[in-house]
Amino acid sequence: MPDVCCAYGCTNRRTLANAHLSFYRIPTNKSESGANRRDNWVAAIKREKWNVKQINNARLCSAHFTTGKKSDDPCHIDYVPTVFSFKKTHGKQIKASLERYERSKKRQRTLSSNESILLPIHEVGSFNETKINELVEGDCLNCPSENEITQRAVEIGTQTEVFVTKEKQLKRTLRKKIFEIQKLKQKLQICQRQLKFTKEKIIDYINIKEKALNFLTGITKPALFEWILQEVKSCVKPIVKTMSLENHLLIVLMKLRLGHKNKDLALRFNISEGVISKIFRLWIKQLANVLCNLIVWPERADIRANLPCCFTNFKNCVCIIECTEIFIERPHNLTARAQTYSTYKSRNTIKYLIGITPAGAVSFLSSGWGGRASDKLITIESGFLDKVCYGDCILADRGFLVEEELATRGAVLIIPAFTKSKSQMAVKDIDLSRQIARVRIHIERVIGL
């Protein structure tokens, strides 16, 4: 027989020195109540990796019960062991639990004694006259009168009826509450499934991987995204308090990169179109204020130090220029409508001149112009020519007819050869056009065309 307590940290053994201690088996699971009690005991003892054989052979000493012994009353605190070295016990809580138990037992004893008073009334017919005389002769003075007994019996009967009525009402209420709980549990399960499905549909920056981030925003690395957020977060406040600042920035960059409509973004992020519009208007201004300092015209020495291999034939190249157009809504004002209409795009657009270094860094960005403005006009009026120095080489497309303006500053314009009014291009022109196209592709990658 095991003679060692199975509780963690307990060293009590079945010895003469511990004769005052009792050692109990873990309750069996032969009945439903026994199985529940057995599970509670095992959970309280907290032994890991216990198998059935070890549980059946284990013993627990009485030192782990508040009263020093176990109780078979489910209402008693010692129905399950509670005193362990790894668990803090509060004397006030134990005392309060024992007092509640004593009050409960006292009420039960009172009800039992009240019911016993009714017994003589129901069985009075079975008493014979001799027994009655003996009772009267024994202690007649201490016996209550018949009227008192009857009155007391009526009072107890009334109380019993009240208790029975209340018990029935409580049972009906309990059944009703149980039914309501079951319905609420079913609704909760449905809501949890719907919430899980909704979360899977909603875009969240936390769940976006690096490749998806590149596709949605054009940003190749999450570290760059985090850097932009750190630079701008002090200037903006969240429009939607329940949405992270990362998702605010993600909305703006997705609209810039992919041209999503507000309705599309509202469905993707589970917010209203008006909120999408507010986020974009606020963040786009702050992004422009913060990131405009990154557009710097570099020194010629820095450009040549970082010149890519594909620019071997254009060693003096300092900038590649291109105009890009952004679609806008059709203006109501007729003058604005005419100024923004682009014959190339057949739409109303805003036009920008962008310049990049051979290494791919944006070095110039003009103000917005109407889509009707020519590439030459924007180049002259935007202030780009003021950046050019003597000996610089500028690569451009055929539409940039600013060769004379650059020549006055000692710069050179290199554009592909014209094919108009030529039946056949010269071999030299073909080779030059091919070389220009090979390096000009970089600006299209930067713009995202």
Image (cartoon, grey):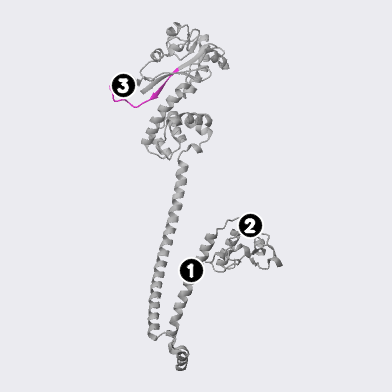
Q: Is residue 270 visible?
A: yes
Q: Is residue 449 visible?
A: no
Q: Residue at x 53, y 33 (%)?
A: 210
Residue type for callout 2: Arg
- In the image, 151: left or right of 320? left
Q: Closer to the camera, 277 or 159?
A: 159
The residue wearing badge 1 is: 103
Q: Residue 175: horizontal and vertical position, in percent?
A: 42, 64
Residue type for callout 1: Arg
Mark 1 closeness class: few <14, some 14–19, many ≥20 residues within 10 Å: few
Q: Residue at x 46, y 16 (%)?
A: 321
The residue wearing badge 3 is: 336
The residue wearing badge 2 is: 47
Circles 1, 3 touching at the beta carbon (< 8 Å): no
- Residue 358 within the magenta-colored segment of the rendering: no
Residue furthest toward the front? 141
Q: Residue 40: horizontal and vertical position, in percent?
A: 57, 61
- Residue 329 within the magenta-colored segment of the rendering: yes
Q: Earlier in the sequence, mark 1 or mark 2?
A: 2
Mark 3 closeness class: few <14, some 14–19, many ≥20 residues within 10 Å: few
State how far apart marks 3 and 2 are (Cα). 81 Å
Which region shows up in magenta?
322-337
Q: Earlier in the sequence, mark 1 or mark 3?
A: 1
State how far apart marks 1 and 3 are (Cα). 89 Å
Q: Closer to the camera, 383 or 359?
A: 383
SS at mark 2 in the image: loop
Residue type for callout 3: Ala
Mark 2 closeness class: few <14, some 14–19, many ≥20 residues within 10 Å: few
